[in-house]
Image (cartoon, rainbow, N blue to C red):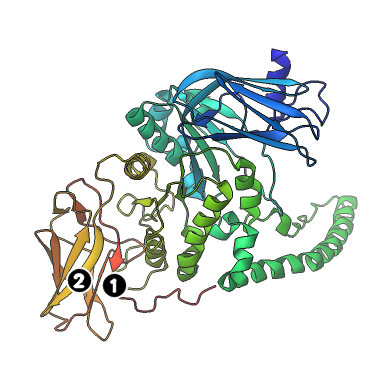
Amino acid sequence: MRSRVVAGVLLSCVLVWSGASYAEVKLPAVISENLVLQRGMKVPIWGTADAGEEVTVTLGDQKAKATAGQDQKWKVTIGPLEAGGPFTMTIAGKNSIELKNVLVGEVWVGSGQSNMSFSVNGAINAKDEIAAAEYPKIRLFNVPTTVAETPQADCNAKWVECRPQTVGGFSAVAYFFGRELYKTLNVPIGLIHTSWGGTPAESWTSKPVLEADPEFKPILDGFAKKAAGYTKAKENYAKQLEQWQAAADKAKAENKAAPKKPNPPPDPARDPWMPSGLYNAMIAPLLPYGIQGAIWYQGESNAGRSYQYRKLFPAMIQDWRKNWGQGDFPFIWVQLANFMARKPEPAGSGWAELREAQQMTLPLPKTGTGLAIDIGDAKDIHPKNKQEVGRRLALSALAIAYGKDIPYSGPLYDSKAVEGSAIRLKFKHVNGGLVCKGEKLAGFAIAGEDKKFVWAEAKIDGETVVVSSPKVEKPVAVRYAWADNPEVSLYNKAALPASPFRTDDWDGITKGKQ
């Protein structure tokens, strides 16, 4: 029996017993051996069975029963559970499924685009990091990249123990984040990685949310236009292929090199930019698995539409929370890192506006950031220092999700006061005092009513910063680190960088971009 179970997991990552019919009890991939269940809550366990079949789930002294409905679906909740393990969980109906090596601890989802996909193999000191990754109480679940037009019930993945043999291809940010939590909390950690490089936030948002807001209509219309053109493109490709085949046959007969075969048009049904396509294929199969929270590293693909992101990003977060059915679980994101050439004069920046849009999402409950504004790479959109990114995300998680009284944020702009020819700035999260990193405070720009920014002189005065320039006699606005790749100099005594900000609300370069 045991060998048949293991074989089933390896082949499909869905526990299907040899000889079982469709009507027998089945589980989704996310509920399989080596899993981590979220402690301190009633965790959902679900699957399919014959309509009317009674299913019993047992874990230690916890037992719950459910009857499969006419749609053959069933769900129970067990718990709350205390951290520990390994345990064995049994799911019994007409057949019996035994899940071994089950742990109870903290479960987090890591999602986004390529900087979340970026693997441990590519991080700094990768060889040493991988060799040291012997953490069998950290478990990894890696959702494969795929697209779907409708919400899916399952995915092709499995839980594995974190070891040198398994960690190399896993998300570096998620792993380093989870490792920090494990060392601090001393409980098992489950990490669910589901991301895809180069993808926008609308791909990770459910269709009803996108359809409900007129501001997102251009997203849906744009993709619909692309899909409509696919039929014509396929017809043209068929003609090109026929012409190519004739030319290739002629070349072969004449003992000549065949011409290059034309490429087929991209199929919109496989396009990761399909609105809701990744939500359907890579988030929906995880619902309603019990989690503590989510970490997110994305935004590069939306930087050309940063004003739209102001509404899209919080809508996506609230969408996940609603559909997960676990209330306002913690959601913590990485603010975009510094990248691209440094400009000599203050200028508009889509990346700065995207960071602002991320910052504007903080009023949502239980949200936080991990800044990467000082650890990016001007020449590489994928900075390799994912250890520090993971650490800063973990600081926010420890404070927001676990109530730890620790510094977890760099200085955040709070308010300004004009004092003659200078502007005084106040900050939150000073955490012991403001600190200048470098010879002098840099990255500050100031402007008058003409909205023309110039580089400014800035100095720390207690828990404030005073900004001025002899070129601006009557200042009205200040910006800091407002660029694709800004100079960064302001920190707090916890060595955490200040978030980029502006005191004005003048129209940015991405306003109206859809």
Residue drawn at the location 80% of the way across and 41% of the way down: 70
Residue drawn at the location 11% of the way across and 79% of the way down: 421
* Residue closest to the eye, 53 or 238: 53
The spot of residue 285 in percent (x, y) is 64, 42
* Quarter of the view holding residue 454: bottom left
**Can see residue 136?**
yes
**Can see residue 266?**
no
Marker disc for residue 346: 1
Tag 2: residue type? Lys
* Quarter of the view holding residue 423: bottom left
Q: Are marks 2 and 1 in contact (CB under 8 Å)?
A: no
The spot of residue 224 in percent (x, y) is 70, 68
Whether residue 260 is situated above or below residue 16 in the rendered picture: below
Whether residue 247 is situated above or below residue 353 in the rendered picture: above
Whether residue 34 is situated above or below residue 392 in the rendered picture: above
Q: Is residue 476 left or right of residue 290?
A: left
Residue drawn at the location 46% of the way across and 23% of the way down: 137
Tag 1: residue type? Pro
* Residue closest to the eye, 164 or 1: 1
Secondary structure, mark 2, is strand
For disc 2, the marked residue is: 416
- Judge depth for marks 2 and 1 and give the one in front: 2
